[in-house]
Image: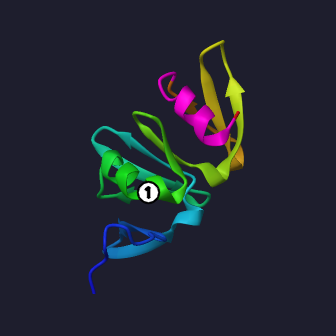
Amino acid sequence: MTQSPSAEISVLPAHLDGEIRLIPLRDVLYCYAEGGRTQMVTPQGELPSRSSLRELSERLESARFFRAHRAYLVNLDHVRSIVPWTRNAFSLSLDGRREIPLSKHKVRALRDLLGW
């Protein structure tokens, strides 16, 4: 059975220890890219993804994930606050006392999306 492009995604695959583990989207705090690799971050730790951050962003845009920065894709369900650093610089505070940067180029899009 093939999945249509508009089908709702509920899990992401992570390749670990010779297995393909299916990680529920609700458990993913954020994804980030570093050194050509993409990692998914959950409360339990980090898991590798074979997809690029751009591919994940395209697949998850309808699932409440937001590209907060060129290197970060965040699950909006885990954002607890928006922390101002300067007049135009912010970070996103997530569950588990984690913070990720919010690109100044993405502030307006997040404001429009969340209505703040």
Tell me which residue sits at (35%, 71%) in the image.
17
* Location of residue 8 in the rendering, given as x and y in whole percent from the top left corner: 45, 70
Residue 4, by quadrant, is: bottom left
Tell me which residue sits at (44%, 57%) in the image.
60
* Location of residue 55 in the rendering, given as x and y in whole percent from the top left corner: 31, 52
Tell me which residue sits at (50%, 26%) in the image.
103
Dot 1 falls on a residue whose secondary structure is helix
Three-letter code, disc 1 = Leu
Magenta stretch encompasses residue 99 = no
**84 lies above or below 41:** above
> Residue 103 or 111: which is nearer the viewer?
111
**76 lies above or below 91:** below
**79 lies above or below 82:** below
Quarter holding the N terminus is bottom left
Please give the residue where the numbered disc 1 appears in the rendered image.
60
**Residue span colored magenta:** 104-115
Tell me which residue sits at (55%, 27%) in the image.
108
Magenta stretch encompasses residue 110 = yes
Quarter holding the C terminus is top right
